[in-house]
Image (tube, coloured by chain):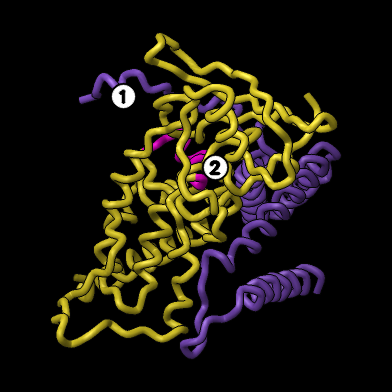
Chain colours: A yellow, B purple
Amino acid sequence: MTSSDGHITLRIARYRPDEGEAEPTLADYDVPLRRDWAILDGLNYIKDELDGTLSYRWSCRMGICGSCGMMIDGEPRLTCATFLTDLAPGPVRIEPLANFPVIRDLIVDLTDFMHKLGKVKPWLIRDEERPVEEGEYLQTPAQLDEFKQFSMCINCMLCYAACPVYGLDNAFVGPAAIALAHRYDLDSRDEGDRQRLTILAQPEGVWDCTFVGECSAACPKGVDPAGAIQQVKLAAAQEAAKSLLLPWRSR
Amino acid sequence: MISPLEARYYRRRMPLLWWTRRRSYAFFMLREVSSLFVALFVVELLLLVRAVARGAAAYEGFLEAMAHPAVIAVNLVALAFVLLHAVTFANLTPRAMIVRVRGRRVPPRAVLASVYLGWLVVTAFLTWLVVA
């Protein structure tokens, strides 16, 4: 159907392994084309009115929870922030996020990322923890600005879906995990740079990245993971050069 | 160990020609291929050095070989790729490098401008070297 009669076709990848399906198939659903409807509203309409068996993840509807990322016409997008009218007359192809295994319909398994995120230690590391009685670790607005953009990550995984390096070899730590590690490296309250660098300087760390840059283009929150990765590369190279030239000074 | 649930996951593989599917991926591949042409220029430079070391006759022979229309055509294509290589590399610099002067962060535009300024200075010096 076309936009003239107020409907748009959503062409959705369905995968139901519990019903014996070996691979996904595309199914068409016509949903009302409303000016204020995002793709997610269309999916909810299908779930409520047309086919209750459609499975997908969503929560906040406002670009904060990071759970509704999918491939829209081949591009990784948040379905709550992509409007139907911008894709009219359709049909709009909706598939699960690329580069992750599909559990069912539009749901992918993110265990791999969760595991990697923990490995890069995205938390404040101190050489010596200060007792609580001594108060907070203070920070100036300028120090906050150093890392603020990297803290905006919502773990929506659009960057992993956009990254061909991760798609070809999922041993790569990946954009969001490195950007979040870098966020703590840049934090004036943190003293864990070295610990993270030993993890990120591994072959599957920053050096796997070939700076395609699509992670940053896909990010819905304006984070620049590609930039973060290159900055970590530079830090790793400087560290390596230092320990080569001044071996007695490296720990 | 893979659980029964994981065994039923649908795992997609990237097609061999994945980079043809998006314009940005194709451009990335062009940028990567450009390094081959940079290598070609390096080889030509080394051949030039060898010819100069072997004396006047070898140098004349080298110049003659480089003046062949086919070689000129290849070199023009190579020049285009080398320029693509240099421009994309320069443009990515401000994102990879945070420069601080007296503790303050230099704005990305200034970093970019200084990269191009450096390029201009080196080019001017080489031009002077060749022409003068």
Q: What x and y, as percent, mark residue B51?
A: 66, 51
Residue shown at 55%/35% (left/top)?
Answer: A44
Q: Is residue B87 left or right of residue A187?
A: right
Q: Which mark is residue B6?
A: 1
**Residue closest to the eye, B29 or A173:** A173
10 Å neighbourhood of mark 1: few (<14), some, or many (≥20)?
Answer: some
Q: What x and y, as percent, mark residue B126?
A: 72, 70
Which residues are the magenta region?
A158-170
Q: Quadrant of the C terminus of chain B?
A: bottom right
Residue shown at 60%/39% (left/top)?
Answer: A41
In the rendered structure, which amino acid carries the disc numbered 1? Answer: Glu
Q: What x and y, as percent, mark residue B47?
A: 64, 48
Residue shown at 52%/64% (left/top)?
Answer: B96
Label 1 vs label 2: CA separation?
23 Å
Which residue has dot 2 on it?
Answer: A162
Q: Is residue B78 left or right of residue A161?
A: right
